[in-house]
Image (cartoon, rainbow, N blue to C red):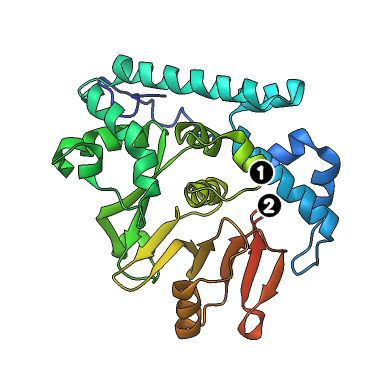
Amino acid sequence: MLGTLIAEPKSDPVGMVNLLDVFPFGFDEFLHATDPALFSYYENIQKGQEIEEIFHRRLLDTYNIYLIIGGVPECIASWMKYKDPARISQIQKELIEVYENDFSKHNGKVNSGRILMVFRSIVAQLAKPNEKLMYGAVRESGRARDFEEAIEWLVSAGMLNRVYNVSKMEHPLPAAFDKLDQFKLFVFDTGLLKHMAGIDNSAILLKSDFPSKGLLTENYILQQLRGQFDVEPRYYSDKNSEIDFVLQYNTEIIPVEAKGGEDKSAPSFKRYISEHQPAHAIRYSKRGYRKDGQNNKSAAVSCAKNKRLL
């Protein structure tokens, strides 16, 4: 689909085409494909149920494998057949090369060099403390008008996911509170982001801490959340606090915190819960699946637990 959404000429026969968004495998689909027995256990986990340590560890091990492989079907097929991370890295390398070569073939009026610059800057953008897109990080003295078409092309083609900052965490999020000039960009597949960031597979398999763990975690969480809600996830950030993701479920606004390890500190998240008392608040981490907080209204949820929570 690269370039087709803004290519000219373009014509859709009204009433004769059904549109379907297709995403890479999510964690649950990956688990179903690679470990049906563990998936059966996972599918039957009930809200509030304590997960036995042996299953928690097995799910976390599968989560670490998912960070390496991602959800691209060819990578998953190779893993099921060979169980060789080196083969996965080679496939990911070739896929990224193919995508970058395609930029120049299908971009139409959009400058292909700028598309490539934006795509290659994503890892550096996500590694920054606030992760908000900075055009100067794409090119020195870069401005919005230089790259807005390239960004729109990559988002429309499905290569990047854009998450807008909101001025208020209130309903309705997109119509009233989107800051259209402030957003983060994420890669559509976490396995490809891992390869683009140059993270060695052994760093993940050995469960060691590494500088890019946070960007992989947020990219993973967004990849699982996309398509589950009528309104795509947002985030909230001001001078004093930041909420990693903001979900709108019917008229309810749900704050989401994403942690790459078992860290309990989340001052902005806890302050929002204390001040606003939301019906639901979700924390993803590697801690066991549990409910806690005032009146059991907030939840700490394992990164390996990705069923719809509401």
User: Looking at the image, is mark 2 or mark 1 nearer the viewer?
Assistant: 1
Q: Residues within 10 Å of mark 1 (few under 14, many from 20)?
A: many
Observer able to see residue 257 = yes
Mark 1 lies on residue: 64
Q: x%, y% of residue 260?
A: 57, 55
Mark 1 residue element: helix
Q: x%, y% of residue 169?
A: 39, 70
Q: Amino acid at mark 1?
A: Asn
Q: Amino acid at mark 2?
A: Ala
In the rendered view, would you say 268 is above or below 261?
below
- Sequence-wise, the earlier of marks 2 and 1 is 1
* CA distance for labels 2 and 1: 9 Å
Q: Which numbered circle lies on residue 114?
A: none
In front of the other: 60 or 145: 60
Residue at x 56%, y 77% (from the top left corner): 279
Q: Is residue 192 left or right of residue 102?
A: right
Q: Which numbered circle lies on residue 304?
A: 2
The quadrant the N terminus occupies is top left
Q: x%, y% of residue 275?
A: 45, 84
Residue at x 41%, y 33% (from the top left corner): 159
Splitting the image into 4 quarters, where does residue 299 fall? bottom right
CB atoms of marks 2 and 1 within 8 Å: no
Q: Is residue 229 left or right of residue 12?
A: right
Residue at x 28%, y 37% (from the top left corner): 151
